[in-house]
Amino acid sequence: MDITVFWRFLAGIGIAGLVILSIVWNGWLAPEQDIPRSIEITLLVAPLLFFVRGVFRGNRDTFIGVMLLSFVYMLLGIWYAFSATESLYGIIMLVLSLCLFFGSLLNVWILDKRENV
């Protein structure tokens, strides 16, 4: 088995998990919303949807872009992790964004290493 399949799978779990988590938590499980649910779901899910196809196809440039985007979700995860009512949401978001980041990073690293050999 090729190791890039594992890292692509890890990045796929990260991006799909973030999309599903954002929809489920903000749609049904959130204890209290300050802004309308539809706006919050749109703001959290729309940037990820631009990269879903490229991540699942293994596009190198998409992995680079999604690495940068995963930092935003890491910061949001840290923010929510220290919240009293949404700490579970923050921890899950942080773990999924780390999966997305490291899956993308190591996939790009291996693809670049193979290209230069």
Image (cartoon, rainbow, N blue to C red):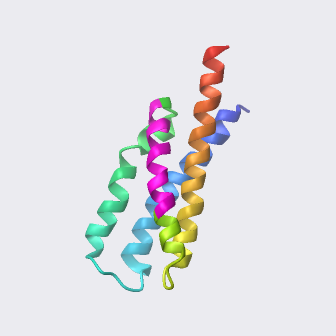
The residue lying at 57 percent from left, 67 percent from top is: 92
Q: Is residue 78 above or below residue 30?
A: above
Q: Is residue 37 above or below residue 12?
A: below
Is residue 14 located in the magenta-colored stretch of the structure?
A: no
Q: Is residue 55 above or below residue 37?
A: above
**Where is residue 106 shown, x and y percent of the image?**
63, 37
**Where is residue 96 shown, x and y percent of the image?**
56, 58
Classify the position of the C terminus by image quarter.
top right
**Where is residue 11 shown, x and y percent of the image?**
56, 46
The residue lying at 36 percent from left, 61 percent from top is: 44
The residue lying at 39 percent from left, 73 percent from top is: 26
Q: Which of these two is toward me, 6 or 87?
A: 87
Give the extent of the magenta segment: 61-75
Q: Which of these two is toward me, 50 or 87?
A: 87
Classify the position of the N terminus by image quarter.
top right
Q: Is residue 76 above or below residue 114?
A: below
Q: Which of these two is toward me, 96 or 20?
A: 96
What secondary structure is the stretch in magenta mostly built from? helix
Which quarter of the figure has residue 6? top right
Q: Is residue 88 left or right of residue 32?
A: right
Spot the residue most to the right: 1
Give the total of numbered labels: 0
